[in-house]
Image (tube, rainbow, N blue to C red):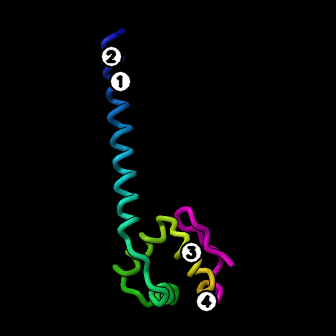
């Protein structure tokens, strides 16, 4: 076996492990991220949150949280918004 082949294989393994670790960190962050209160989701829809609060809420929504997507459906309908897609969850009427 040529010497470069094991090095390439080792490099690919390191890349795969790094990618898996990043994925686990993302999952752990999502699991520790508490769900926003329904009132906060309403404030988000109305544009009443601070920039930092908006960012935190959007980060949570980007995890594809189906619970928050379900809570947002009626709020979006009341506000006259069109369907949205966050992470793996579609928020629509």
Q: Are marks 2 and 1 in contact (CB under 8 Å)?
A: yes
* Residue occupying the point 37% across, 52% down: 24
Asked which secondary structure carries label 3, the reply is helix
Give the residue pinned by disc 2: 4
Q: Residues within 10 Å of mark 4 (few under 14, many from 20)?
A: few
Above or below: residue 23 compared with residue 74: above
Specify which label sits upstream in the sequence, 3 or 2. Answer: 2
Give the residue pinned by disc 4: 79
Specify which label sits upstream in the sequence, 4 or 3. Answer: 3
| Residue farthest toward the right in the current orientation of the protein | 93
Q: Which mark is residue 50?
A: none
Q: What range is drawn magenta here?
A: 77-93
Give the residue pinned by disc 3: 69
Please tell me whether residue 10 belongs to the stretch shown in magenta. Answer: no
* Residue occupying the point 63% across, 85% down: 74
Specify which label sits upstream in the sequence, 1 or 4. Answer: 1
Residue 65 point in image, percent of width and height: 51, 69
Q: Are marks 1 and 4 in contact (CB under 8 Å)?
A: no
**What's the distance in space between the residues labelled 4 and 2, CA to CA?**
60 Å
Give the residue pinned by disc 1: 8
Asked if residue 56 lies left or right of residue 46, the reply is left
Residue 62 point in image, percent of width and height: 48, 66
Give the mark toward the camera: 3 or 2: 3
Q: Nearer the viewer, residue 70 or 61?
A: 70
Q: Nearer the viewer, residue 48 or 21?
A: 21
Asked which secondary structure carries label 1, the reply is helix
Q: Nearer the viewer, residue 50 or 9?
A: 9
Q: Residues within 10 Å of mark 3 (few under 14, many from 20)?
A: many
* Residue occupying the point 35% across, 63% down: 29
Give the mark toward the camera: 4 or 3: 3
């Amino acid at each position: 076996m040529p010497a470069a082949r094991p090095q390439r294989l080792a490099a690919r393994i390191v890349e795969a492990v790094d990618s898996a670790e990043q994925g686990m960190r993302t999952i752990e962050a999502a699991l520790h991220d508490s769900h926003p209160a329904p009132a906060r989701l309403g404030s988000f829809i109305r544009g009443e949150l601070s920039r930092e609060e908006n960012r935190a809420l959007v980060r949570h929504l980007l995890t594809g949280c189906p619970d928050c997507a379900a809570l947002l459906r009626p709020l979006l309908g009341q506000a006259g918004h069109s369907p949205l897609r966050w992470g793996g969850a579609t928020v629509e009427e």
